[in-house]
Amino acid sequence: MGRQIESLAIEKGIKITAIVDNENEWKEKLNDIKKADVGIEFSTPKTAIENIKKCFHINIPVVTGTTGWHNHFDKIKKECIDSGNSLFFASNYNIGMNIFFALNKYVAGNADFLKDYNISIEETHHTAKIDSPSGTAITLADDLINELSWIKKWVNKESENKDELGIISFREGDVTGKHDIILESEYDIIKLSHSAKNRKGFAHGALIAADWIIGKKGVYSMSDLLKL
């Protein structure tokens, strides 16, 4: 993702003040980093939190797309607000995927009609993806659980329990990202599907978010940007 964002930023004439890949480079390039209007953070679950905090410490708005650290989100959100900083977080920056999120919420809003359906999510990504299930799949699952009172939790496997939402994860080749929401009853099957054709769409969305958050304070998401 870092390379995709770098390439697209150059293509769009956006100046990159620094590219940081490790702790030493944070120290070596600090003066250049401080010249930035915004930081874009795509790393790993283990390093994302410290990267975000470093941006807070030098008062740079930060856009992050790293997933797998959600259990620390409330703490980071509080630190952002208390320190008067800016954080933009999304599990998926693809614009079409965020329309897909809105469709998922719309379907879940018709809860009374869904009790006859077994609902599951399937997600497929490239073999190098670290977290499982994907952050996007978790977002889809959480949105369903928030609306459907009989589902209490998601599990990263197939499930026939009415109170569990099964997320089935596949890691195959160089698949950019595919997510299916499957609703099956004894009468029919409904499938909502989104497939990312390439990673450029994620970079495009991240750059839009980076431009949008400049001058704002607080914590934001794609629903704020797109007004979905």
Image (cartoon, rainbow, N blue to C red):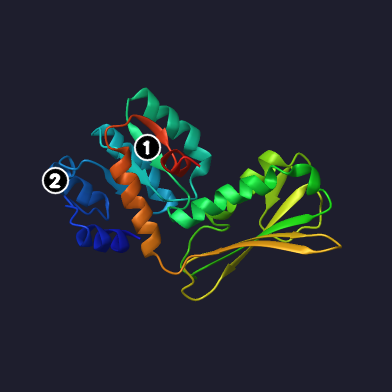
**In the image as oriented, which residue stretches furthest toward the top?**
82
Residue hosting label 2 = 32
Residue hosting label 1 = 87
Q: Is residue 133 left or right of residue 28?
A: right
Residue 143's image quarter? Answer: top right
Q: Is residue 84 left or right of residue 35?
A: right
Are the residues flagged by discs 2 and 1 in contact, CB closer than 8 Å? no
**Location of residue 27 with respect to 75 vertically, above or below:** below
Q: Counting other residues with Cα less than 10 Å from the Cα at mark 2, is it few (<14), some (14-19), or many (20 or more)?
A: few
Task: Give the SS element for disc 1.
Answer: strand
**Location of residue 55 with respect to 162 vertically, above or below:** above
Cα–Cα span, label 2 and label 1: 20 Å
Residue 175: x and y in percent read 49, 71
Q: Is residue 25 left or right of residue 208?
A: left
Residue 218: x and y in percent read 38, 30
For the N terminus, the quadrant is bottom left
Is residue 139 among what the camera can see?
no
Residue 77's image quarter? Answer: top left
Residue 216: x and y in percent read 32, 31
Task: Give the SS element for disc 2.
Answer: helix
Is residue 46 among what the camera can see?
yes
Pointer 2 or 1: first along the chain: 2
Q: What amino acid type is highlighted by mark number 2?
A: Asp
Residue 195: x and y in percent read 52, 66
Q: What amino acid type is highlighted by mark number 1?
A: Leu
Q: Counting other residues with Cα less than 10 Å from the Cα at mark 1, is it few (<14), some (14-19), or many (20 or more)?
A: many
Q: Which residue is drawn at the image coordinates 37% and 37% (left, top)?
A: 87
> Which of the two residues, 77 or 211, is positioned nearer the viewer here?
211
Q: Which residue is drawn at the image coordinates 58% and 54% (left, top)?
A: 137
